[in-house]
Amino acid sequence: MKILASVISIILLISSCDSPGTNTDKPYEKEEPQTKTFDNVYLGADLSYVNEMIDCGGTYKLNGQEVDPYKLFAQRGMNLVRLRLWHTPQWTEYSNFQDVQKSILKAKENGSQVLLDFHYSDDWADPGKQLIPEAWKDIKELEVLGDSVYKYTKKILLTLNSQNLLPELVQIGNETNSEVMMPLAAENYDSINWKRNVFLLNQGLRAVKDIESQFDVEIQTMLHIAQPENALWWFPEAFINGIDDFDWIGLSYYPKWSEYSLNDVSTAIESLVSTFNKRLMIVETAYPSTLVNADPANNLLGEEALVQGLPATPQGQRNYLISLTKKVLNAGGEGVIYWEPAWISTDCSTRWGQGSHWDNATFFDSENSNEALPAIEFFDADNY
């Protein structure tokens, strides 16, 4: 009965929050400064592309001088670097374990903590695609697959520990709205086998906890869902089905793809924090500083990504980030990470075109030799 009462309580709390579509066409609202302490607040960046961009000849500048984005962002106040880890990608030399080791070292050399994002895939894992690594594709027994998840997660962390590169936070899965580690031929993501889903996620969580115990260290764990409206249904299901204890709710929040406007996103954040008593961080967000496309690779964020009152200008990008961060902190969240502020245009190509699909949403001006933009002020705690 206690379990049933808890489930009912969760459902009632979630259903009591405002409709996600409410007031979506209100103009951007300025906020009064808030007084949250910054001892435990994260202002971060996903810098998974930096090594590749540098190898491709890309440069970053501040006042005309070349700079290292890790160092520049850290000097401005960045205290957390997020890095994705693919299992065994055959299509790229980046975001594999060797590449991630180099990136973690860079982050720590510049005084930043690290959030390591296990995709548990050889490719992008996202709400519409959670494909099992090729190395595990022939495993039929759930217990064996779970053991593989546990041993792989633990092996990565053991190796990092031996190099003094343990991350401070670990994300178990990326945008796991749909069922994780699905067969390579899977096309149906409309339903989730929750028993299987939770079992596999728990093996990753358990591996992190065992590393903590073995080496007497603290590694905080996170589960990550894309868009707040999906977190509102996903986490009740996860708890009902026995998800193990974890520390953080991680969210992707892109206004373009969310039912929640910038003005209303705090409603969902408040509900998630109060309902589940977990720390919460936006681990992916972005905003364009221009609508100009610098290269043949089509940009993912165009005019449809704009919030009323926040134009696609350098100042509009900056204001979006500062406004969102204030809303997150005032709603009980404890951090914001910008997704790929350094994915600049280069002569290299993605699988879909030459250049970057994000050149208009980085923190560097593609029309001015990649000069740093005002968005780097997002890392400055004095703005909050």
Image (cartoon, rainbow, N blue to C red):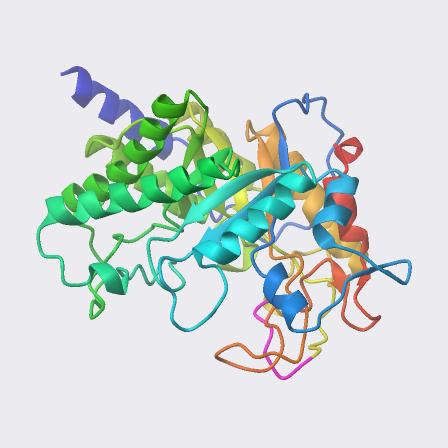
Q: Is residue 298 magenta?
A: yes
Which residue is drawn at the image coordinates 56% and 54% (left, top)?
255
| Closer to the camera in the image, 270 or 194 | 194
Q: Is residue 204 magenta?
A: no
Residue 210: % across, % down:
31, 28
Q: Is residue 191 visible?
A: yes
Which residue is drawn at the image coordinates 74% and 32% (left, top)?
384
Q: Quadrant of residue 13?
A: top left
Query: What's drawn in magenta, residue-wise?
Result: 295-301
Q: Is residue 305 above or below residue 268?
A: below
Screen quadrant of the N terminus: top left
Which residue is drawn at the image coordinates 63% and 84% (left, top)?
296
Q: Is residue 233 visible?
A: no
* Secondary structure that dominates the magenta span: loop
Residue 209: % across, % down:
34, 28
| Closer to the camera in the image, 88 or 337 | 88
